[in-house]
Every structure is written in C-alpha cells, then in structure tokens.
Image: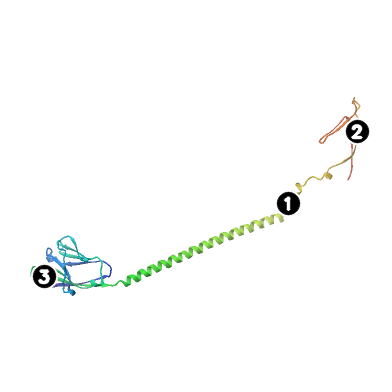
Amino acid sequence: MAKVGVSRATGHSGGRMMIKCEHPQHKTKPKYICKESDGCSERKNPGVQDEWMENGDVSLYDDTRAGVLMVFFRELKAADAGTYRCGVNVSHYTESFTELQLDVEDDFSMIIIICVCVSLLLIGGFTLTVCKLRHMRRGRTSTSNKRTKNIISSCADSRRDSLTDPGSAQINSHDELPTIPSDELLYASVSFQKHEESLSEASVTVSKNELYSDYATVSRRMRLN
C-alpha cells in the first residue's frame, strides 16, 4: 500500500461538498474512499463505473475517462470531519491512495451574518415607514393650512371690496325699495271747459290708467306738499 499524496479540504456544517480523488495513472481500476481515522473499517465505492451511485450519506462517481473518483457529501456534519483515504486497487495485493484531511466548521459566522442582515432589513423598513408617515402628515397639514389661507384671503377681499365702494351697496338696496307715493306730483284740482262741437252732455271718464274727457282743455294746478 503506497501513499502518493496529501490534500486538505474544509466545509461548513449543513452544507454540501464535492471531493475529487484523482488517479490518472489508474483510470479503469476500481476506486474507493474510507475514513482512515476509523481504521478504514468501512470502504465506500460506487460498485459500478461511470454512473452516480449512492452509498450511505454520500454519492460516488467513478470516472474511468479521467481516472477520478468524485465523492459528493449532500449534508456535512461535524462527525464527517477527519482524515480520509482515497484509494485505488491496483491489484489484489497493491493499493495506492491519497490522504485527505477534511475539516468541518460550524457555521456560527453565517448565522451572525444572517441575523445582522435581517436586523438591518427590519431597521430599514421601520425607518422607511416612519418617514412615509411623517411625509403624509406634513402633506395633510400643508393642505389644511392652504385651505385656511384661501378662506382668510377670500374674506379679506370681500371686506376690502365693501370698504372701497360702500355706495354700491346703498344704491342697490335703494333701487329695490318701493316707490314713495309722495315723490310723484299730486294735482289739487282739475277744471273742465266744454268743447263747442259737443252735442251731448259733457262727461268725464276716469279710469286707473287713463283720463278721458269731452272737454277741450284741462287746466292743471300743482299742489305743493
């Protein structure tokens, strides 16, 4: 049994990992992997070549074209850490292998990073919400103040107009008042003289809207109040 090389790999607990054990000088020879720290009591090999096969908690692929045994850990555990032997059976009596040191680290740093990222997202979301609420409140306050200013300005304009032209209101209100009868001319007396050509008795007809008479002239005398 001959050791032809030493390599090292590091993985994280709960993660996946691919290990390649290269034997280019023995491409078609059957290959295996075992945990040397356990005395290689259990050898894992694909059993077939050029196909993926599952063996326990790993998947194996013996690539005869490249002379490589690929070992895929689907989920690393702390117990997977240790020294491995990636071997190839050269003959019934001879083996060749590469020593592999596999380290599995607990991913406390990743948990911390995730926690920090989540905390930052929460803080950012809270800050954004507060800023949005403040902006909405300022918008409502600005709208309310603008409406109040418009109302005050309108009232001031109306008051300014009434002070600038006070006579307009008086004239308008005066126009709507009823006519005082005493403002018109009143006649104290009316004298009638008969027209010479009239053949009938003289008559005077007074109606609401007109005055008709058979007399030739009507003399008016004004009465002053």
Residue 73, image quadrant: bottom left
In primary-sequence order, the first of circles 2 and 1 is 1
The answer to whether mark 3 and mark 2 are in CB contact below 8 A is no
Q: CA distance from mark 3 to mark 2?
A: 165 Å
| Side (left or right) of 112 relative to 164 | left
Residue 90, image quadrant: bottom left
In primary-sequence order, the first of circles 1 and 3 is 3
The residue drawn where x is 12% and y is 70% is 96
Which quarter shows the C terminus?
top right
Q: CA distance from mark 1 to mark 3?
A: 122 Å
| Side (left or right) of 145 relative to 33 | right
Find disc 3 in the rendering and name its residue: 95
**What's under tag 1, amino acid-wise?**
Ala
In primary-sequence order, the first of circles 3 and 2 is 3
**What's under tag 3, amino acid-wise?**
Glu
Which quarter shows the N terminus?
bottom left
Image spot of residue 12 (x, y percent): 27, 70
Q: CA distance from mark 2 to mark 1?
A: 48 Å
Mark nearest the camera among 3 and 2 is 3
Image spot of residue 214 (x, y percent): 88, 29
Q: How is colour applied across the structure in the image?
A: rainbow
**What's under tag 2, amino acid-wise?**
Phe
Find disc 1 in the rendering and name its residue: 169
Using the image, tell me which numbered label, if any, was put on residue 192: 2
The residue drawn where x is 56% and y is 61% is 142
Please state which of residues 219 and 64 is positioned toward the viewer in this rendering.
64
Using the image, tell me which numbered label, if any, was put on residue 37: none
The residue drawn where x is 71% and y is 55% is 162
